[in-house]
Amino acid sequence: MRPLFGVVPTAAVLCALLVAACTGGGAPATAPGPARGASEAPAATVAAPPGRASVAPLAPLSPPVTVRVGTTSALTEAGQIIALQRGYFRELGLQVEYEQFDSAARMIPQLASGQLDVGAGSLSAGLWNAVARGVPIKVTGPQSRHFDNACGFWFTVRKELVDSGQVQEPKDLAGRKIAGPCLECIGDYILETALATAGLTLADVDYMALGFNDMLAALANRAIDVAILAEAQATIAESQGFATRWRCTSLARPGYQSTVILYSAQFAEQQAEAARRWMLAYLRGLRDYTDALFRGQDRDAVVQALIEGTTVKDPALYQRMGWTWLDPNGELNVPSIEEQLNWLRARGKIEGQVQVRDVLDLSFVDFAVQRLGRYDTTGLVQ
């Protein structure tokens, strides 16, 4: 184990049932592609930003290896979108082919069968139970975590309820109509942990599952009081004047683990070199994301890459949105994952004796960090 403030490098567990929660944007008609005019170097010589060690060239695989990746083109996929747009995968001899999905849940069968190499999404009982049944899936790296100052997933409340003072604290959610992206998954977990701070449970609210776009309509029509919304929908709701991004979903659990990277067992075991290189390119994308959104370095170019690779096309939204934390060292909040698993188990949703360790493979992030060196995150999130 390599603990750091209760966080262990790399991954946790993908959700089978969440409709890309903690993501933003939804799915475009076509998968993202490299930006026009992007430079493709013959070898992966990693330039060293100030304060980071340079990295020796790594010759690309020859012939290139095709990597089949599931995508929802959500903003939590920013690391791999940036890596693709900037040619980092190609530099390492990887030819990435994206398959579009409308939710992470639909990736699971193809990951299990090896038809898909890489997927991403959030936590629910579906994956745990698949692993308990012997489905060969490996969790290998993190996606989003949320903090007060690094949030991409919000409790979004009807504006008049906030402006009138009717909703000020978690206790004021009692009796409210609240929509989340799914049932018995990350949505109800973060809602119940927030309610617990006021001595409430899910039984004290009228909770339902809706798609993100349906939540926008329901808020606008006053059919619900609160929506658990990802970016950019949360900012769209606020900018249109009918809702307020009231609190981050990290309200009760700062830094909770929301989404992760998942490999098929075939990719992890039979194409291990390609799997290591995919993670290396991905972490380079995460570092560019962190430099841009949390340090203000090369921000315009990174935002343009995200405009090209997601359905969030309005540059003005990027100036107002909250930005989730995508750890540039590939670190995962394992205690958070353990808590979520235990939360599901206590509700009778977990079959068998599956444990977090049954799905983790930390070797790919370890390889990437060894080559890139550690990124200094001091003071960036809280």
Image (tube, rainbow, N blue to C red):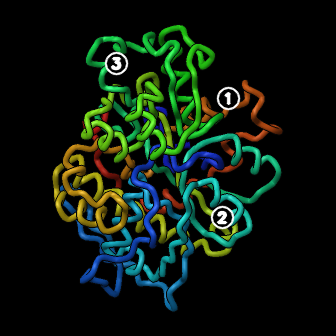
Q: What residue does disc 3 label?
A: 161
Residue drawn 67% across and 74% down?
270
**Crowdedness of circle 3 by 10 Å Cα count: few (<14), some, many (20+)?**
some
Q: Position of residue 123 (x, y in %)?
A: 59, 42
Name the residue beneath numbered marker 1.
Answer: 342
Frontmost residue, 220 versus 373: 220
Name the element at disc 1: helix
Q: How far apart are labels 2 and 1 at the CA level?
A: 24 Å
Mark 3 in CB contact with mark 1 (< 8 angstroms)? no
- Quadrant including the N terminus: top right
Q: CA distance from mark 3 to mark 1?
A: 34 Å
Q: Residues within 10 Å of mark 1 (few under 14, many from 20)?
A: some
Relative to the observer, which residue lies in front, 322 or 29?
Answer: 29
Q: Quadrant of the C terminus?
A: top left
As shown in the figure, which amino acid type bears the numbered disc 3?
Leu
Label placed on residue 264: 2
Amino acid bearing label 1: Asn
